[in-house]
Amino acid sequence: MASPEERENGTESGPRRSRRQRAADDPEKAPQSGSNSSRIGWSPYDEGPRSRAPLWFAIGGVALLGLLGGGLALMWNADGPSTVETAASRRTSAPLPSVPPGKYGFAADRTTDPDPISVKEIFGNKKKFTVSGRAYEMTITSKDKKCTDGALGDKLQKALKSGKCAQLVRASFRDKAGKVIGTIGVANLTTSKTASAVAKSGDTKNYVKPLTGKDSVTKFIGSGSGGAKIWTHGHYAIMVWFQNKDGTKPDSKGSKRFAQAIDDITKATVFKALDNRTLTGSALT
């Protein structure tokens, strides 16, 4: 598996888990909760040591959401080689094909990883989960009819079209306290190269469309200031938007909390599926 540094995909492609990273600058006054506008008041498009989740720094800029409608562990038996020998002699199925070279293996290209993605595969079916004692909840999911329906900004939409995006799935999450909320989207492109082009298109006006929930917390996603990031895993582009529930710009402590939440959530959901595809070239079941 790649190191966090290897997951970096250019100056704007951001972090990746096993290949991922970060964010934050100064927003203008945040709109009222429930407002239909999204503003990137902080964003992760450089700086700092890299990690699997983005680190954030503040920048200015306004984008209207309303414009578009709103290790692998090898288990060795204690009985020793004789047990492995016996199991091998009884195996009747064909051996798995060799993983293609490169850090993304089968997942480097859609031709070697042809199965379509789904909401269930990418985000799982557990609405509530805990990572290292930190609790999160998935509140809403979406499989967009067209990839561009789940993206904001002309550059990003154009890159998705050029990369022949086949599916875009999104889900929104909250932490247990209901203070940190965000949307994660995964787009299925043709190749690692086209996924990189999508990541490079990301900026303060081009990012995943925040997916508004119906609950009392994630219904505020997309209102106020937020941080956006796009990075890649083979022929997939992972896009995130995270914010405070009240839309205010986070301080340094809050930025670290965002980075931790993104790392926790993607580790428990997205990267389980994509790491499996790297090794097998098929959907996680």
Image: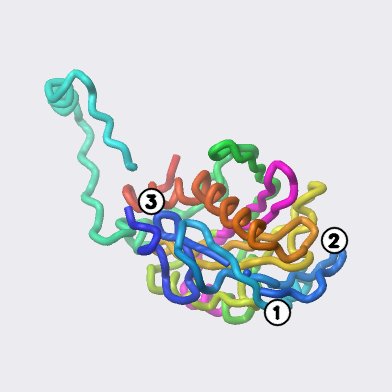
Rendered residue at 38%/68% (across/down)? 192
143 in relation to 166, above or below: above
Please state which amino acid type lies under the numbered disc 1.
Gly
Q: CA distance from mark 3 to mark 1?
A: 36 Å
Residue under label 2: 34
Instruction: Mark yes or no: residue 147 visible.
Output: no
Badge 1 element = loop
Q: Which residues are magenta?
A: 157-185
Q: Nearer the viewer, residue 49 or 119?
A: 49
Q: Where on the picture, by quarter, is residue 101? A: bottom left
Side of 58 relative to 1 (left or right): right
Residue under label 3: 277
Residues packed near mark 1 inside 10 Å, few (<14), some (14 to 19) or many (20 plus): some
Residue under label 1: 61
Please state which amino acid type lies under the numbered disc 3.
Arg
269 in relation to 210, above or below: above
Tell me which numbered mark, 3 or 1, is placed earlier along the sequence: 1
Percent x, y of residue 81: 13, 25
Q: Nearer the viewer, residue 2 or 269?
A: 2
Please state which amino acid type lies under the numbered disc 2.
Gly
Rendered residue at 71%/75% (across/down)? 26
Residues packed near mark 2 inside 10 Å, few (<14), some (14 to 19) or many (20 plus): some
**Quarter of the image containing the C terminus?**
top left
Percent x, y of residue 147: 58, 67
Question: Which is in the foreground here, disc 2 or disc 1?
Answer: 1
Badge 2 element = loop
Q: Nearer the viewer, residue 283 or 44?
A: 44
Tell me which numbered mark, 2 or 1, is placed earlier along the sequence: 2
Side of 15 relative to 86 (left or right): right
